[in-house]
Image: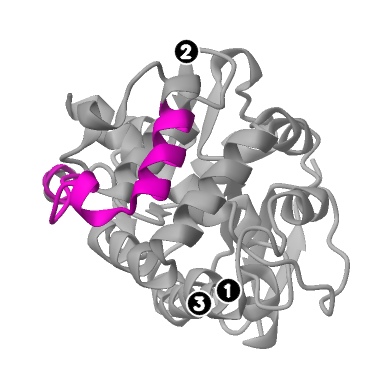
Amino acid sequence: MKNLFKSLAVAIAIIFCATIQAQDKSPKLENSLLWEVSGKGLSKPSYLYGTIHMICGADYFLSEKTKKAFEASDKLVLEVNLSDPNEITDMQQLAMGKEPLDKKLTALQLSTLEEILKKSTGMNVQQVNKYSLSSVMSLIFMKTYPCTDLKVYEFEFIELAKKRNFEVAGLETIKSQFETLDDAYTNDEMISMLVESVKDGSTPLVDDYKTENIEALYKRTTGDKFMNEKTRIAMLDKRNSNWVNQIPELMKKQSIFIAVGAAHLAGEQGVINLLRMAGYKVKPVMK
């Protein structure tokens, strides 16, 4: 059960990545998941890595350049520190809804959710009635992967950090992620997003990820069918800005390895461009 809740946290992070509206005002980025951050008085470079969060075991990879960058770092920074037991406890609590789904949703919304649940998981609404809509969305999204041996990049990095006795930190909390998701979307919008996510599946996303094409990945995981201006600001702009406000102080103290969803890297308000605007040199690590 503990691992299920951890996977729920990662699946919610994936939903965040799949709901970002594309922007094309920033310079085109090279095909690389790994970026070196230097300059502005830093004594050592830090590294920014884009994850897909969850991937089938057969598709999982960690390049040599990434392993070298990780070994050259002193601290691991994730979106959420999934090695913190308190975060997992919060996840367990937040997974339960404030009210049952059959009280929260309209008859039409329940019918749509029931159809998706049966098709993707073989379950019905009553079986998940006590869970939050965000949690149910996460469970369904996990089923879009064509395998059962899912590997989670965050957990892999945490294991590497343990072996090297690295400290692990988070840029935000599980609670803040749930709050942002709930505030950004109405029930109708959340169910519509779920319909589109299930329809598209995970295979195209994985294909782009394996070629490290973050521009294509960004465009594929974004679009008007997933969001409006209000959700774009809540789900992308504010979060990326909050992260970039924290990162400079972390980099001053030591070399850090930052692993966040790859869709956060690109775009005018993406982490790469925001760090560049803050005066840092951010370059792709090609080999």
Name the residue located 70 percent from the left edge and 76 percent from the top edge: 273
Determine the CA span between mark 2 and mark 3: 33 Å
Please report contact status of discs 3 and 1: CB closer than 8 Å, yes or no: no
Mark 2: which secondary structure?
loop
**Which kind of residue does numbered mark 1 sit on?**
Arg
Q: Which residues are magenta?
A: 89-117
Q: Is 104 a magenta residue? A: yes
Work out whether residue 202 or residue 66 is closer to the camera in this orientation and state it: 202
Determine the CA span between mark 3 and mark 1: 17 Å
Mark 1: which secondary structure?
helix
Residue 65: image location, x then y, percent: 68, 38
Name the residue located 55 percent from the left edge and 76 percent from the top edge: 42
Where does label 2 land, which residue?
Answer: 149
**Which kind of residue does numbered mark 2 sit on?**
Asp
Work out whether residue 202 or residue 140 is closer to the camera in this orientation and state it: 140
Where does label 3 land, which residue?
Answer: 244
Q: Is residue 169 visible?
A: yes
Residue 137: image location, x then y, percent: 40, 42
Where does label 1 land, which residue?
Answer: 232
Q: Is residue 101 above or below residue 29?
A: above
Q: Earlier in the sequence, mark 3 or mark 1?
A: 1
Residue 222: image location, x then y, percent: 70, 58
Tell me: 262 left or right of 209. Answer: left
Q: Nearer the viewer, mark 2 or mark 3?
A: 2
